Image (cartoon, helix red, strand yellow):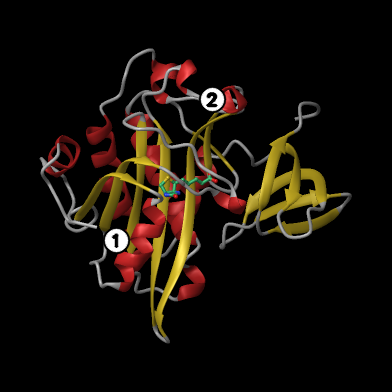
Amino acid sequence: MQKTFDNILTKTIKENLQTKYIGQNIFYKEETSSTNTDAKKLAKENAPNGSLVIAETQGAGRGRLDRNFFSPKGKGLWFSLILRPKFKIEDAPKCTLLAAVAVALAMEETGVKPEIKWPNDIMRGNKKLVGILTELVTLSANDYAVIVGIGINVNFTESDFPEDIRNIATSLAIIKGENVERAKFLQRILFFTEDLYDKIETEGFGEILNLWRKFSVTLNKNIRVINAGDKREITGRALDIDEDGALIVKSDGKIIKVLAGDVSIREVGN
Ligand code: BTN
């Protein structure tokens, strides 16, 4: 993958980018299979901390739980960040929370209220706007990189979505009634990512967790969650997320910690 600035999207991202390292190195492709796959390869080839891998379209965009992620040309932001954290590898999954909060803060500035649904989707009502897929790359015994892949439905119209996801997906443009400038929006996401990432070193993850709680539409609701591992259905009250982003659910008087899964908010009794 070439590092290139000879296209309008990367040129505009670079102009007045308010960061020191996040997004300062851009790897751009008009078309790729998955920016996460590209980013993993680049991480192994020593791409610097904060590198941005972005494509106009992905032929095989990947979602959580082995799902596909629809990423048509020019309609959204499909990108991955390569992070080389100094903190211990056990803390790496928290980069997903960081990413969700950074996108939420940037989205708030566009006038669209972000609703984070556990674990890391950003929604409008029950329709999805943003998905995040975080993956780890082990480089040596003491060295690793985190790939944070973010997909945002920015300028889709209703008919741009295939029929099978039209009822479960939406876009910023549909909500706002006008298009959003992708490069400017991405610049703000990169800015907030760097700001939160820098603070981890001095202050830990406290601010990220608190902001995540603030934007959450899952907490303090009666929910049904399908546990990713054993596919068990758990119903109960979502109380909180713990330090690692696991969902704490009170179900039949018992406290259960759910590490990964799919959550739906129950209609009754919220
Ligand atoms: C999900 O909602 O399940 C996560 C979706 C993550 C999609 C993004 S798009 C950019 C990056 N490249 C991928 O293949 N996936 C992530």
Q: Nearer the viewer, residue 38 or 257?
A: 38
Q: Quadrant of residue 166?
A: top right
Residue 40 visible within the image: yes
Residue 221 shows up from this direction: no
- Percent x, y of residue 47: 24, 67
Along the horizontal axis of the image, is 68 left or right of 83? right
In the rendered structure, find residue 198 and report the number of the disc placed on it.
1
Q: Residue furthest bottom?
A: 141
- Mark sitting on residue 162: 2
Q: Which SS class for mark 1?
A: helix
Q: Quadrant of the C terminus?
A: top right
Q: Is residue 197 left or right of residue 216?
A: left
Counting from the top left corner in percent of width and height, residue 66 is at 59, 52
- The picture places residue 49, in percent across and down from the top left corner, at 26, 65
In screen coordinates, is 50 left or right of 229?
A: left
Q: Label 1, label 2: how many angstroms apart (C-alpha)?
A: 39 Å
